[in-house]
Image: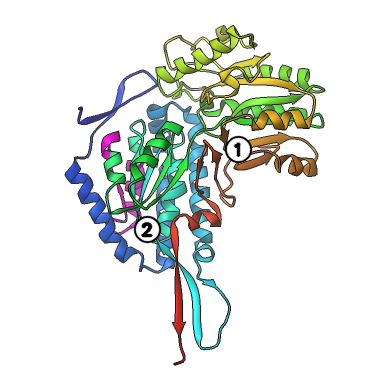
Amino acid sequence: MTKIQKTISPVDGSVYVERPYASEQEIAAVLTRAADAQTKWKLVPLGERSALCARFVDAFVAKTDEIAPELSWQMGRPVSMVPSEVRGTDERARYMIEIAATALADVQVGSKPGFTRFIRREPLGVVLTIAAWNYPYLIAVNSVVPAIMAGNTVVLKHSSQTPLCAERFAECFHEAGLPDGVFQILHMNHASTERAIQDAHVNFVAFTGSVGGGHSIQQAASSRFISTGLELGGKDPAYVRADVDLEHAVTNTVDGAFFNSGQSCCAIERIYIHERVYDAFVEGFVEQTKQYRLGNPLDPETTLGPMVRPAAADFVRAQTEEAIRAGARSLIDPNLFPANKPGSPYLAPQVLVDVDHSMDVMKEETFGPVIGIMKVKSDDEAIELMNDSPYGLTASIWTRDEQAAIAIGDRVDTGTWFMNRCDYLDPALAWTGIKDSGRGCTLSALGYEHLTRPKSYHLRTET
């Protein structure tokens, strides 16, 4: 088995980063150091933790100009769009720092003569974060900063596609003055990662990735009584009602479908349109899709970069071709996008109509720049189709009627329900999924509950 991790850039197929995989001895040393550091870190006053984490965020934001091309080389996002990930990381980290004092406060259970009673939120210990490549900083920060704020120590294992993102976090924490051992990184292969999960020093695993990866993480942890947070796949639907602000809906659903080349767990992957606005919506959607510029992500004019690797693009091509053979109709001529090349990671966006739920493109995760659009006659039909999925991460409705949106949302199986927006994580709201989209929760005050355990204090003060 190779001992070198190689990152192949989707930009040109070159080897962009090489890193040695950590040895078993190195992994053991890192986990031991994390456990030792945690016994001291949990005693550090919350105000000091907040100050250190705030300095980490400052250091990270200051590196935006360095991070942008580096991230484009690693995973292909257009360099002009990388700053949005830096801003999102900043927003989430600062929010979780801001609410920590309230979210981690002792739970008071009421007075009782002769007793002092309360519930304290104890840190779990060592948190192993296993982050995905598609939003490498946003995904990692969801668990890293709140875990450290809660008094845990963190070991970050990033995707082999984005190892420099882990190193950037380590660099920024070092500049912030975080004590040794509180945050560390490891470059590991799958086998070593599974063994790390089984190590007695690890107390919680935060994983973002595929459904198959989630099953592997859960299986690796099954012999131990530790919790796992799993953010997995999605096949997120949008429903456009007849009372919609059409221009707003078209602009935002196009962006929700194709930003990051559709490589987002919460990207819009299927759209249901009320028959009264169907034709106008499809016409507008197609015209806006044609405005994308597919090309080298290092070019500031590029708005659609390559997919992460040729195999990923080939999967999307195959799913699209299968739908067309089954009767779907494509509305975008790939020749409009000269950079589109079969067998390469450069893939033109595609809009499919005349689709149905017998096609994988409407049922199974695509994770690429292809969208299926179906006509519906009613709210009930849209709800039935939205729920006809093994996934449940986010769903959106596009309407002027807030009360209808809430009523319909109550009937849709999803972790987050949007009205007139999509593909965004508000750090004040719990980020969670159901069904094959995973389990657990990050962000919001509720996110802290998954990174701590309750410890009851029952003190008799009168004897």
Tell me the distance, in whole angstroms, between the alpha carbons under discs 2 and 1. 29 Å
Picture coordinates of residue 213 (x, y %)? Answer: 40, 34
On whether residue 164 falls in the magenta region, the answer is: no
Q: Is 405 on the left-hand or right-hand side of 212?
A: right
Q: Which residue does the image show at 31% across and 20% down from the upper left? A: 14
Identify the amino acid type marked 1.
Thr
| Residue in the foreground of this view, choosing between 94 and 210 | 210
Residue shown at 51%/49% (left/top)?
A: 441
Percent of width and height locating residue 372: 63, 20
Quadrant (top left, top right, bottom left, bottom right) of the C terminus: bottom left
Q: Using the rendered image of the protein, determine whether residue 138 is visible from the camera's viewpoint.
A: no
Q: Which residues are magenta?
A: 166-192
Q: Tell me if 404 is positioned left or right of 4 in this view.
A: right
Residue 409 in percent (x, y) is at: 70, 41
Q: Is residue 412 above or below residue 204?
A: above
| Residue pointed to by mark 2 | 152
Residue occupied by mark 1: 394
